Amino acid sequence: MPQPLFLAVDWGTTNLRAWVVGDDGAVLAEERFPWGVGKLPPGEPERRLQESVRPVLSAEELPVLMCGMIGSTLGMVEVPYLDAPAGLDDLARALHRVDGHDPAVFIAPGLRCVRPNGDPDVMRGEETKILGWASLDPARQAGRRLLVLPGTHAKWALIEDGRIVRFITAMSGELFDLLSRHSVLKSDEGPDDPAAFAAGLRTGGEPGPLAAKLFTARSRVVGGDMPKSAVRDYVSGLLVGDETAHLPAMIGAEDDDGVIDLMGDPALCALYETAFAQRGVRTAVHDGDAAVLAGLTALHRQGAAA
């Protein structure tokens, strides 16, 4: 009979996922909570962990290992970023132990890197998910892979021999939300329009500034070339098309001819699959929940949270 070993927590800006992991690596219990750190006042994350998350999962006597925005200025305590390139061993050595907790509470550091053009970039939580994904298959521990995590702030990570070498964040998801709700391009949700999305992909993939491409969503409607109901999918296609066309070169993977790996929400991944297929690029989709749990479990297994 497996015994509870530790409480694994992925605590982001909008929600929290927690798993009780047994000494055989199996998940003994899991819960989701709508308590992202972006919704909580200072001091509240610590109280929620102790008074709600632990009791709900009967984990009062277990050590805790967390990743995500819980280690940011919005969370429980700010944990310094670790510099890339980095692997799980580097993350394990840099785990931060939060003062005043027994059993112990640890938070994984985020990563920072320098983009090929010299600009800085950062991530929190995705590093544990990405390295957890790499740990799930020995084939991912050798060679070079490009992993894309679609989302509010999409992450493009270049992985070599199981280590994150560098990454780039694209605010495509947040831009889509802002444009759809608060701009001249705002539109109500309606039936999916694959033709509008495909048209957006074509325009988004063309050379030129994204700001100029975006206005074509307006000009197509007022010029009578596209119904207003198609704007939402057209803008989605524009943003995904621009991102998938230009990020491979920006991250230094434009000459790679292998499969691009996708991980995240299935519906979002499907949009990126369509975009890459239009460019003749093969893709493979992976489970994000399994990856982040694998990352937290691997960190614990290395003994850093013992």
Image: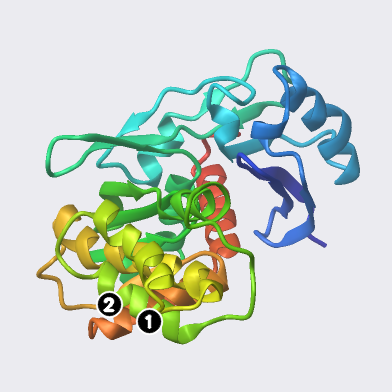
From this viewpoint, is residue 134 visible?
yes
Please identify the quadrant where the C terminus is shown. Answer: top right
Q: Position of residue 113 (x, y in %)?
A: 26, 37
Q: Position of residue 5 (x, y in %)?
A: 72, 46
Q: Position of residue 13 (x, y in %)?
A: 61, 39
Please identify the quadrant where the N terminus is shown. Answer: bottom right
* Local secondary structure at mark 2: helix
What residue occupies the far front of the structure in this picture? 223
Residue where numbered disc 1 is placed: 198
Amino acid type, callout 1:
Ala
Residue where numbered disc 2 is placed: 202
Q: Quadrant of residue 215?
A: bottom left
Q: Is residue 219 above or below residue 194?
A: above
What residue occupies the far top of the structure in this picture? 100
Asked whether disc 2 touches disc 1, contact meaning CB atoms under 8 Å apart, the reply is yes
User: Is residue 219 rendered to the left or right of residue 128?
Assistant: left
Q: Position of residue 51 (x, y in %)?
A: 88, 29
User: Is residue 115 rendered to the left or right of residue 137?
Assistant: left
* Local secondary structure at mark 1: helix
Packing grade of label 2 (10 A; few <14, some 14-19, many >=20) is some
Amino acid type, callout 2:
Arg
